[in-house]
């Protein structure tokens, strides 16, 4: 495979959106399209990819706001862990609470399974805690983890929102993420990238 990856902040809350694709097949995925669909689609075109899936680490509004428009343009199926369906269905309420314009999103059509393989070399890892359905995506050959709002540089995801659980989050990080290659780059839901090894040793909330 000839894997290409680009991550950048998008949307009103600057969620890190990641596009990963295989240049040999010309297919790719968009992870966490949180807004600015024009920017996301321009990047897709720049990378020369045809999008075959819109994949979400979880269903908070800042990670899903552009899913409707990108689905309309690409027809790509929407992926989500089923434990976050209730949150997905509350998007209009979330937008009202945060003062963000509401844009409808289609129902998910692919339910993510733990340890499910992705066609571009990745694997789905269910990492609940920030939300019940929070999922991370690990690309072993590329040394990459898309962690959503589970793990950040020096920090972890909030658990004070509905559905959050601090103990579950810590277990997900220790038992699932910290067992992966320490050299792997972590793309968090917001802010700068880090590595698994750095967080194992220096994270202020969860250390190995």
Image (cartoon, rainbow, N blue to C red):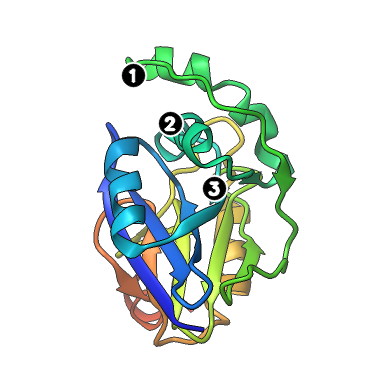
Please, is residue 103 above or below residue 134 in the view? above
Give the mark count: 3
Relative depth, front residue between 62 and 39: 39
Which residue lies under the disc numbered 2?
65
Circle on res. 54: 3
CA–CA distance between discs 3 and 2? 12 Å
Near mark 3 (Cα within 10 A), the count class, few <14, some 14-19 or many ≥20, is many
Q: Is residue 190 left or right of residue 118?
A: left
Q: Are marks 2 and 1 in contact (CB under 8 Å)?
A: yes
Please, is residue 92 above or below residue 168 in the view? above
Q: Is residue 206 visible?
A: no
| Residue 163, x across and y down, in percent | 61, 35
Near mark 1 (Cα within 10 A), the count class, few <14, some 14-19 or many ≥20, is some
| Residue 158, x across and y down, in percent | 44, 44
Which residue lies under the disc numbered 1?
100
Relative depth, front residue between 178 and 191: 191
Q: Earlier in the sequence, mark 3 or mark 1?
A: 3
Near mark 2 (Cα within 10 A), the count class, few <14, some 14-19 or many ≥20, is many
Q: Earlier in the sequence, mark 2 or mark 1?
A: 2
Residue at 31% x, 72% y is 194
| Residue 124, x across and y down, in percent | 64, 65
Q: Secondary structure at mark 2?
A: loop
| Residue 52, x across and y down, in percent | 57, 54
CA–CA distance between discs 2 and 1? 10 Å
Residue 117 lies in quadrant: bottom right
Q: Secondary structure at mark 1?
A: loop
Q: Nearer the viewer, mark 2 or mark 1?
A: 2
């Amino acid at each position: 495979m000839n894997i290409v990856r680009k991550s950048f902040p998008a949307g009103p809350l600057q969620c890190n959106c990641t596009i990963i694709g295989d240049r040999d097949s010309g297919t790719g995925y968009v992870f966490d399209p949180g807004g600015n669909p024009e920017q996301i689609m321009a990047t897709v075109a720049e990378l020369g990819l045809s999008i075959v899936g819109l994949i979400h680490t979880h269903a908070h509004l800042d990670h899903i706001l552009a899913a409707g428009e990108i689905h309309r343009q690409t027809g790509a199926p929407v992926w989500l862990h089923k434990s976050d369906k209730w949150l997905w269905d509350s998007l209009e309420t979330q937008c009202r609470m945060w003062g963000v314009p509401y844009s409808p999103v289609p129902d998910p059509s692919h339910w993510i399974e733990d340890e499910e393989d992705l066609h571009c070399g990745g694997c789905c890892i269910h990492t609940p805690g920030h939300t019940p359905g929070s999922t991370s995506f690990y690309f072993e050959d590329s040394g990459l983890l898309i962690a959503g709002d589970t793990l950040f540089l020096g920090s972890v995801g909030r658990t004070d929102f509905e559905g959050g659980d601090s103990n579950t989050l810590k277990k997900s990080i220790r038992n699932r993420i910290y067992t992966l290659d320490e050299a792997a780059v972590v793309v968090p839901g917001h802010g700068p990238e880090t590595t698994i090894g750095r967080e194992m040793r220096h994270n202020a909330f969860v250390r190995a």
